[in-house]
Image (tube, rainbow, N blue to C red):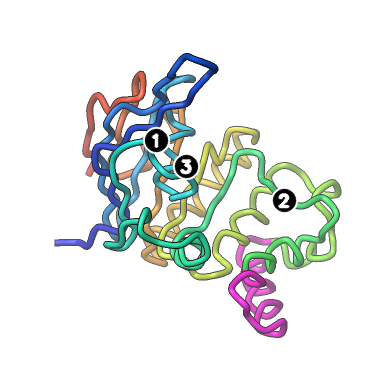
Amino acid sequence: MKDVTIKLDNVWKIYKMGEVEVPALKGINLEVKQGEFLAVMGPSGSGKSTAMNMIGVLDIPTRGKISLKGQDISKLSESDLAQIRGKTIGFIFQQFNLISTLSALENVTLPMIFQNMPKDERVERALKLLEMVGLRERIDHKPGEMSGGQQQRVAIARSLINDPEVILADEPTGNLDSESGHKVIDFLQDLHKKEKKTIVMVTHDEDIAKFAGRTEYLHDGQIVRGRKRF
């Protein structure tokens, strides 16, 4: 049986809007197992972004429990949580979230700085990753000097810099044309099949979700059904 890397146990997230309580998640139960490719689907307003924050342990639940590699995140200090999250999870965002004043190389090396990696090691690894995503000749280019597809490939390289076990991709093709989007999906599939990475992809697109091995569907803050593809 494969190990459970991330587990959500009866997770609720309730936001307060003045005197009104708005539940974004209503008792989510979800396990992310080592080595799987999971898609989380749902329409706008279904709670996908909140679920992504919970799966990525970027936020804490109002009620319920989140475990990361068997550790209850509520029992970790913020610094300890940041360290284990930084080593375990790599993030790919729809908006790329690159720093506009930094080059591709600098953007990719940034997460390693927070893990106290030596500069030579950061640069060497970043160069290899940028070459892997086909951007070796763009290392000195800033985000504004690259296409959307190229920026997303920089983001993929950045997500891999600490060699995380899990890649969490939030609408990774949402801002890309179809050709660039398919290249991103190809990268994710290679990471899953060849590098044995665990992939969690949040998407509203059924055509993109079909590449996952398992799909969970969110509606009004609840998982309504799951389907195994192969």
Residue 157 shown left or right of residue 140 in the figure: left
Q: Amino acid at mark 1?
A: Ala
Classed neighbour count for the residue bearing mark 1: other residues with Cα under 10 Å, few (<14), some (14–19), many (≥20): many
Point out the tag, 1 or 3, that comes first from the N-terminus: 3
Please name whichever residue, 42 or 209, is drawn nearer the observer in this view of the structure.
Answer: 42
Expressed as whole percent of the image width and height from the top left, the position of residue 96 reads 66, 45
Which of the image's four quarters has the C terminus?
A: top left
Mark 2–mark 1 Cα distance, whole angstroms, equals 25 Å
Please name whichever residue, 229 or 45, is drawn nearer the observer in this view of the structure.
Answer: 45
SS class, disc 1: helix
Residue at (47, 67) in percent of width and height: 80
Magenta segment: does it hold 60?
no
Expressed as whole percent of the image width and height from the top left, the position of residue 58 reads 49, 48
Point out the tag, 2 or 1, that comes first from the N-terminus: 2
Classed neighbour count for the residue bearing mark 2: other residues with Cα under 10 Å, few (<14), some (14–19), many (≥20): many
Classed neighbour count for the residue bearing mark 3: other residues with Cα under 10 Å, few (<14), some (14–19), many (≥20): some
Mark 2–mark 3 Cα distance, whole angstroms, equals 18 Å
The dot on residue 209 is 1
Which of the image's four quarters has the N terminus?
A: bottom left
Q: Amino acid at mark 3?
A: Asn
Q: Are marks 2 and 3 in contact (CB under 8 Å)?
A: no
Q: Of circles 1 and 3, which is in front? A: 3
In this rendering, the answer to whether 114 lies above or below 207 is below
Query: In the rendered structure, which segment of residues is drawn in magenta?
Result: 112-134
* Residue projecting furthest to the top: 20
Magenta segment: does it hold 122?
yes
The dot on residue 98 is 2
Residue assigned mark 3:
53
Residue at (46, 55) in percent of width and height: 167
In this rendering, the answer to whether 29 lies above or below 84 is above
